[in-house]
Image (spheres, helix red, strand yellow):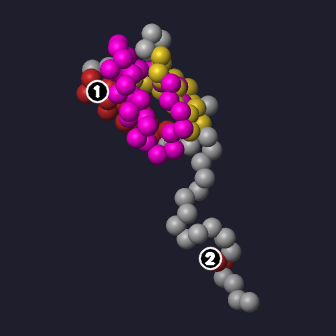
Amino acid sequence: IKTTMGNLCACPPNAKPERKETTLKYYAGMTCGGCSSAITRIAKSIEGVRDIQCDVAKKEVVVVGTMDEKTVTEKFTKWGEKSSKEVKLLESL
């Protein structure tokens, strides 16, 4: 059997590395159910999002899954800019 260093991995050639599940907590200047619905719709469109919780009264959004933190932050920030709402990442667990 002939092997080379490049063939030692059993992963399929274009396999993405598995991501660890994380929880991201954001401040989002939501003022109504429409804001909450928009944030939920955006989050659900992101690959790896398993759960999304919006609390309009506290202006908090919690996203759980294996998603990319940068992608979520960019999409929420874009929503904030378009709707004149402040958005910032509070915690990444």
Q: Residues within 10 Å of mark 1 (few under 14, many from 20)?
A: few
Above-or-below relation of 42 to 32:
below
Give coordinates of residue 12: x percent, y percent.
58, 69
* 56 in relation to 7, above or below: above
Q: Residue 6 carries which label?
A: 2
Task: Provide the secondary structure element on which disc 1 rests.
Answer: helix
Residue segment shown in magenta: 24-53
In the structure shown, which secondary structural element does the residue marked by tag 2 occupy? helix
- Viewed as shown, does residue 5 lie left or right of 33? right
Q: What kind of residue is marked 2? A: Gly
Q: Please check the rendered image and state whether residue 45 is part of the magenta-colored stretch, yes or no.
A: yes
On the question of residue 64 being in view, the answer is yes
Which residue lies at the image location 37% right of the left edge and 25% below the top edge?
A: 37
Q: How many marks?
A: 2
> Where 27 falls versus 71 (above or below)?
above
Task: Residue 5: give x, y in percent of width and height.
Answer: 66, 77
